[in-house]
């Protein structure tokens, strides 16, 4: 049989993270690799009550085909909780915010279109855009986000102008960094000046540790932004429930792409989440996640201080979210470190996985949310041992 | 802000069905338009028990991120219930079988690729393929399915060879027709001879009324087919749970496309359905759906016999599924009939919506599963009144 694959499949490659996660499924490995929320934060009993209520009071509708836009009351609840004036008609419920990336790619990217991303950026966004065969350009970025001068130089002209900049301002995956207020203001202003749409991804914004992050980019210029949100980090990822907010110029095409992709997001899941949210549940629940993750971040920072002394390793101090970014001493590679770390019972993701352009081989991503504080302490000790072992190894 | 849409969005148009469904949401309209399973068939109490068990015994895993392939036990259960030797490793769980169409389009279609479909065909497949910008070619078809001689003439040569034929052999949407055993054998043989992959969509196969349909095409040549299945019609569509079975040459790319599209289908929903299926549930439940839909088909056939006498209207007798196909007398158009029908309290979908090429304007699709037998009787009477009204109207 002559299966002829589409040329785009050459751009679709197995996820490095995926292959690494397989490695870390070996028993006895403490994984700081995956971005898995702590199951301790899943409100299992609340979901059980919500399921029972939905099936009892609204079972037939919850189990039937439904509108592609999403469940009306959930769209209204999403609009109401966002910190700018959002018309529920501009809210599209998606099967996780990953689907939002797929839909935006379909609607805004032609083969060869320029698309701008941060350096480094979320790997899943690169994978979602890949089937549309864009030319992905990595904009130089620092601890506060994308470099505004570099952005202007990267945006291109006329038909070659970038279709959008993809940006994750809060507790970014993979770096854990947060875009500062000044940088946000400058970015929105420069993007408007350039006519450059922004695709703002905000899965982690509610997981702040000391104080809330600055206002979203979209709140500053809703007409120029598509906003992606998610219930995966504040409730549970296994329901695959996210949303996007888009201006009227692009919403109808995103809706058509959604309908073609999976008709609609499961109505049962939408009602479950709407039901759980009643009575201010998230206002009580999310602070418990913040507290847990802050403790685990602090455990990781403390362990790094204790274990990495004198090794020349640098790391940041994320103000929220799930990830910490670490940089090895000059000449070391995180890809070389990984097998030594796995031998010692700890896994992480080499930073190279997250670069659309040239990678910094010294970087790596550590998750502080899946493992317990005690496991984090053990794992960071093992990671330091692996760094020492790599340092001792003769250069090949 | 300069939103520049991808050129593929020009091929993505609002669904006619979607717009019509809005029309039929007016109170008092009996809709024979939508393909909505009867909510009387939804096993609400079984789902409620399954939800409770899943959350009690496996809550953390059900609510966590999961493998893109799907929940292992469900993949095994799907493989075990299919009537040919299926390796669970070749089963991919999808967010409804609509997503299977999206993934196959991404992996097998380049812009301008030839793709073959039946005449008429499932509108959702055309919508799923549209973003990949294929050249869709409609293969002449009769009451038994695609015309084999016409298929050979349509397949193209070399680089222009069709990437696949999309076919829905059992109780097709929209026509309700079933591909005969002889036609299946001839099709699989001819497709193998031509090197033409088949995309077999089988959402309705279990809903037979008198006897099971002939074996699937894929069972006859698994290496040359991708098979799409669904739980939407045997359990409930609101969970958005389908699957595909694909040969090793294409499975890895479909899996990567799946991961990029929505990471994975909700693990909670997968476990719910697996749990409900335990103890031979479908063997007891599906016959009750068959009985109900057979009664409703018979109600529609009886009502048509009574109401349409002397009007020159023709219709078929579906052996299963959800739809009946009707043809108006020469010179009449189903699009012209629709507003007259809606005025009289009944809605349907004009057949023109389902043609990739030239449409037969006289055709229309009637669903016999959503409305009750009594409503069907009333609706068909109103439809006959509308036909009479259209016949009386002076030609413009």
Image (cartoon, coloured by chain):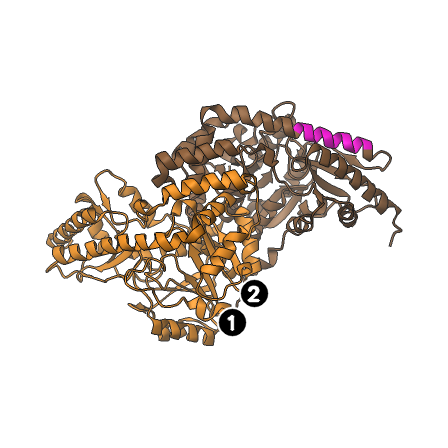
Chain colours: A brown, B orange
In this view, B354 is above or below B264: below
| Chain of the residue under label 2 | B
> Residue A125's quadrant in the figure?
top right
User: Is residue A304 rendered magenta in the image?
Assistant: yes
Estimate how packed mark 1 is, as few (under 14), some (14 to 19) or many (20 or more) residues with alpha carbons within 10 Å: some
Q: Is residue B3 visible?
A: no
Q: Secondary structure at mark 1?
A: loop
Q: CA distance from mark 1 to mark 2?
A: 10 Å
**Residue A186 position within the rendered picture, expressed as x and y whole percent measured from the top left:** 62, 29
* Magenta-highlighted residues: A294-306
Q: Find disc 1 in the rendering and name its residue.
A: A1
Q: Position of residue B188 (x, y in %)?
A: 42, 72
Label 2 residue SS: loop
Residue at numbered disc 2 = B249
On the image, the x and y values in percent for residue B51 come to 45, 40
Give the overall secondary structure of the magenta segment: helix
Q: Nearer the viewer, residue B225 or A170?
A: B225
Foreground residue among A159 and B321: B321
Is B260 placed left or right of B333 in the picture? right
Q: Which mark is residue A271?
A: none
Residue shown at the point (21%, 52%) measured from the top left: B336
């Amino acid at each position: 049989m002559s299966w002829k694959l589409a040329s785009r499949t050459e751009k679709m490659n197995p996820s490095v993270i995926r292959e690494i996660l397989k490695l870390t499924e070996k028993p006895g490995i403490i994984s700081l690799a995956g971005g898995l929320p702590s199951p301790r934060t899943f409100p299992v009993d609340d979901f059980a009550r919500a399921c029972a209520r939905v099936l009892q009071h609204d079972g037939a509708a919850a189990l039937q085909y439904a509108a592609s836009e999403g469940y009306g009351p959930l769209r209204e609840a999403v609009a109401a909780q966002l910190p700018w004036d959002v018309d529920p008609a501009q809210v599209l419920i998606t099967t996780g915010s990953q689907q939002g990336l797929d839909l935006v790619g379909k609607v805004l990217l032609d083969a060869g279109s320029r698309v701008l991303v941060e350096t480094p950026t979320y790997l899943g966004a690169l994978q979602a855009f890949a089937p549309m065969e864009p030319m992905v350009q990595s904009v130089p970025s620092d601890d506060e986000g994308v470099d505004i001068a570099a952005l202007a130089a990267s945006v291109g002209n006329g038909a070659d102008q970038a279709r959008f900049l993809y940006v994750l301002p809060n507790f970014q995956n993979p770096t854990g960094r947060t875009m500062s207020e000044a940088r946000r203001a400058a970015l929105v202003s420069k993007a408007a000046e350039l006519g450059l749409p922004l695709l703002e991804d905000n899965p982690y914004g509610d997981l702040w540790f000391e104080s809330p992050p600055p206002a979203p980019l979209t709140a500053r210029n809703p007409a120029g932004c598509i906003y992606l949100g998610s219930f995966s980090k504040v409730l549970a990822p296994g329901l695959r429930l996210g949303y996007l907010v888009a201006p009227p110029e692009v919403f109808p095409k995103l809706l058509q792409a959604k309908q073609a992709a999976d008709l609609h997001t499961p109505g049962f899941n939408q009602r479950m989440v709407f039901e759980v949210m009643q009575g201010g549940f998230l206002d009580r629940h999310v602070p418990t996640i913040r507290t847990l993750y802050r403790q685990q971040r602090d455990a990781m920072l403390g362990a790094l201080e204790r274990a990495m002394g004198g090794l020349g390793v640098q790391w940041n101090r994320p103000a929220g979210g799930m990830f910490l970014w670490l940089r090895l001493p000059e000449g070391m590679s995180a890809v070389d470190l990984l097998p030594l770390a796995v031998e010692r019972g700890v896994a992480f993701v080499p930073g190279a996985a997250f670069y659309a352009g040239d990678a910094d081989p010294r970087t790596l991503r550590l998750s502080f949310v899946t493992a317990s504080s005690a496991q984090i302490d053990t794992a960071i000790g093992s990671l330091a041992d692996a760094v020492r072992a790599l340092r001792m190894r003769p250069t090949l």
